[in-house]
Structures are given as C-alpha cells and as structure tokens.
Image (tube, coloured by chain):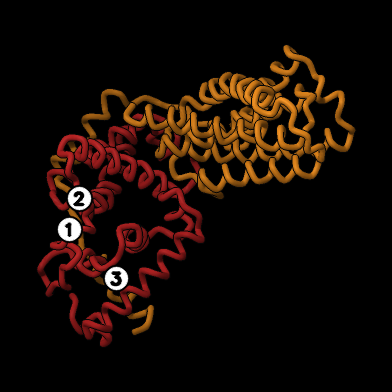
Chain colours: A orange, B red
C-alpha cells in the first residue's frame, strides 16, 4: 500500500461535515459580547526579546556595581570578549524562546529541556576553555556563596522579565517557567563573571554554571504552582 | 481576527461560526461525549477572548487557536483526574484501541482509521487532515519542531499502511471505507 492511498482514505474520511449546535454558537457569541472592546496586540518578538536581554543585562550590571567589578578587572580582553559574547548570545536565544513560550502558536526552535542543556553545555565548554587552575580551595563554602549570589540576582531578573511579558499567555506554564528561569539564571552568571575573582576551574565550572539549571528548576516549580491560575 | 481584536462583534461572530466546528471535532475526538466537547468549546472561546491580544496580525491564525484549545483540553483532563483520581488515557482503553475499522455510516471514520495510532500521531494527522494545517502550522500549534512533526507523520503513515494492508484495504477508498 502506498502513501497516496493512505492519503486518499484520510482525505475522504475527514471530509465528513461537522455541524455545531447553533444555540451553542449563539451562547458563545453572547458570552463575549459584553466584554468585547478593542485590544492592543503584543509588540513584535524582537522588541520583547530585546527588552528581556536589556533587563537581564541591567540587573547583572546593577548587581556587579553593588558588589564590585573585581572579576571583570582581572580578566584579559580576550576572556572578557569571549565570556560576554557567549552570555549575550545565550541570553538572546533564551529570551526569544521565553517570548515564544508566552505567545500561543509561536514557532519553536528548541524545547525547554534542549535550551537548558544547550546553555549549560555552552557555559561548561567556555569555562573549560578559559580557566585551567585546578586547585580546589574552599570549594564548598566559596561555591555555595557564589551560587546563592547568582540566584539572588536571578530573582529580580525573573520578576522584571515576567513584568514585561505579563500580557502573554503560557500554553505550558512549566516549560515557560523553566525557560524564564534559565534566562534569569544567565543574568546571575553574568553578574558572577563580573564580580567573582575565584578563577579556579572547578569552582567556575560547577558553581557558576549551576546557577542556570537551579534557577531554571525554580522557574519550572513556580510555573507548576501557577498552572491552574 | 484583526477586526475581532479591534472590537468588531460581527467579525467575532463570523470567527466563532467558522472555527467552532473544527475545534469541536478536535475535542470530540478525545473526550467522546458531545456535552463535554461543547463545554470545552465554550471554555476555549472564553480563553481565546481573554488572550486575544496575544495573536499578532500576519501570523498564521489556526496554530494560535489550536495551541489554546490544546491547553484547555489538558486543563480539563487535569481537573477530571483530580476529581475522579482514576483517569485512564484514551489510547489505553481497550474499547477504543481495539476498535476495528467501521463500516460506512457507523460514525466518524477518520477516528476509526486513526485508532491504531498513538495519541500524538493522531493529533498531528487530525490537524493536517481536518484543519488542513501545514507541517509548520502543526509544529506551531503543538509547540514542537517541524522535524518532530515530520517524524510523527512518517510513523503514522507507516502504521496506517501496515494496518490497512493487513485489513485488505489496498484497493483504494472505494474498497471498504466510505
């Protein structure tokens, strides 16, 4: 049997006329009539994406300005360029996917899980390329301090991002929360790269990178909690 | 749709009349009961109305409708499973999964044809054949990549070819079904 024959069967079977009760249609029309007023469509995707990236950059800069740009000052020009370019690119991709999550019927390039995996692998690759000091002094205590600082920065980034996209509608709130959390986590990582002077490879690889998946997981939990609302 | 967003009631009514049959058929395929499908259709329109500003003129409209309808359907299942506590997936129900191809006039032949497929394959085929959506539009409606939709369609056709061959339907549409 060929695909064309299967297609013929499906075409013929799907051509059955389907009527909806006119009373139901009238009821639906009446139910929206009283609240029918002009609405302003959401801005284009690139505007919202740009807004999200600016919010994340501003929050990271504000966090680093408060704690000091010590890490950034110790980095070479090449390291600064590579780190900022990678984080900027990842933030743009995550912001674009976050916008898609909040507009029904949008084109999707990655699933939420694939985006999180891609961001984590890209950060690990970049840090492994740049940092080669494998000493592990104060690994846990310094690491937890950095993780908490990164997460603290991601909270305002997530809140402001949600504020920008508050008119959106998530068809899958868990997935939207995960992507939004990952984006906010990238803001936290950016702040850490500007501030943290601990360039031990394992510290940066484990604790700085961890901000993104932990923040994404928190975002998914928030999305799950808000699912019914 | 743009006129509906601008507050034009005639446009809203025309849209409701035009899209509702497709959406109701989409729900009927899953819930089985006409009353439930009617409830879901009403819920969907209320949701559509509330978030109508999220549609952007120039974008394909059907994926936007179906993405919202899918969300309403999922919420319905979640509520139902919370209240009954023992919801079973439709595809797991032996009465549906093992339904043989029906004779002419016995009901919805498309659903009978699609019965051997998995739910995700059925959904994709329904959107393409009933709603006439393209691969790109189905991908948008289901929040998947186009590649993933293509793969589902390919597998669905493979399954259908095997089932139809096994049932001796190679002679063409006039051979058995309507």
**Chain of the residue under the numbered disc 3 shown in the image:** A
Residue A24, above or below A4: above
Q: Is A170 rendered above or below residue B145?
A: above
Q: Which mark is residue A156?
A: none
Residue B35: quarter of image = top left
Residue position marked by numbered label 1 in the rendering: B93
Q: Which residue is mark 2?
A: B88
Q: Is residue A188 visible?
A: no
Give the residue at mark 3. A10
Q: Is residue A157 above or below residue A88?
A: above
* Residue farthest along the left direction in this orientation: B106
Are dots 2 and 1 in contact, CB under 8 Å? Answer: yes
Q: Earlier in the sequence, mark 2 or mark 1?
A: 2
Identify the element where label 3 is drawn: helix
Front tag of 3 and 1: 1
Instruction: Please state which of residues B124 and B99 is positioned toward the viewer in this rendering.
Output: B99
Q: Secondary structure at mark 2?
A: loop
Task: Where is residue B77? Give x, y as percent.
Answer: 24, 42
Front disc: 2 or 3: 2
Mark 2 Cα-neighbour bin, 10 Å: few <14, some 14–19, many ≥20: few
Determine the residue positioned at 17% across, 73% down.
B101
Foreground pick, A44 / A97: A97
| B42 relative to A19, above or below | above
* Circles 2 and 3 on the same subunit: no
Q: CA distance from mark 2 to mark 3?
A: 27 Å
- Write down the quadrant of residue A142 in the picture: top right
Residue in view at x 70 percent, y 16 percent? A62
Residue A53 image position (x, y, % from top left): 65, 30
Residue at the top extreme, as displayed: A66
């Amino acid at each position: 049997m060929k695909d064309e024959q299967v297609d013929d069967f499906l075409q013929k079977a799907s051509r059955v006329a389907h009527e909806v009760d006119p009373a139901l249609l009238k009821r639906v029309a009446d139910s929206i009539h009283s609240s029918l007023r002009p609405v302003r469509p959401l801005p284009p995707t690139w505007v919202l994406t740009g807004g999200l990236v600016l919010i994340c950059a501003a929050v990271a800069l504000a966090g680093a300005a408060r704690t000091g740009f010590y890490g950034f000052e110790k980095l070479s020009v090449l390291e600064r360029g590579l780190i900022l370019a990678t984080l900027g690119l990842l933030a743009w991709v995550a912001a674009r996917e976050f916008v898609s999550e909040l507009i029904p019927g949008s084109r999707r390039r990655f699933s939420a899980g694939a985006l999180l995996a891609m961001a984590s692998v890209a950060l690990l690759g970049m840090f492994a390329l740049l940092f080669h000091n494998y000493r592990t002094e104060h690994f846990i205590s310094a690491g937890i301090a950095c993780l908490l600082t990164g997460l603290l920065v991601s909270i305002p980034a997530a809140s402001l991002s949600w504020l920008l996209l508050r008119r959106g509608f998530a068809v899958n709130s868990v997935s939207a929360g995960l992507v939004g959390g990952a984006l906010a986590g990238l803001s936290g990582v950016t702040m850490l790269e500007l501030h943290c002077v601990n360039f031990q490879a394992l510290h940066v690889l484990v604790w700085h990178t961890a901000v993104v998946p932990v923040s994404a997981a928190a975002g998914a939990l928030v999305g799950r909690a808000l699912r019914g609302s | 749709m743009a006129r509906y967003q601008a507050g034009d009631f005639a446009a809203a009514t025309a849209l409701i009349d035009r899209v509702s049959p497709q959406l109701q058929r989409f729900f009927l395929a899953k819930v089985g009961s006409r009353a439930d499908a009617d409830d879901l259709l009403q819920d969907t329109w209320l949701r559509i109305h509330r978030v109508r500003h999220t549609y952007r003129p120039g974008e394909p409209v059907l994926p936007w409708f179906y993405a919202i309808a899918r969300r309403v359907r999922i919420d319905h299942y979640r509520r139902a499973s919370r209240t009954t506590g023992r919801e079973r997936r439709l595809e797991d129900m032996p009465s549906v999964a093992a339904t043989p191809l029906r004779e002419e006039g016995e009901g919805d032949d498309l659903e009978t044809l699609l019965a051997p497929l998995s739910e995700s394959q059925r959904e994709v085929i329904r959107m393409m054949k009933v709603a006439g959506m393209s691969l790109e539009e189905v991908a948008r409606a289901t929040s998947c990549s186009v590649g993933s939709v293509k793969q589902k369609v390919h597998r669905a056709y493979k399954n259908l070819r095997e089932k139809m061959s096994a049932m001796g339907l190679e002679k063409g549409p006039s051979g058995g079904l309507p």
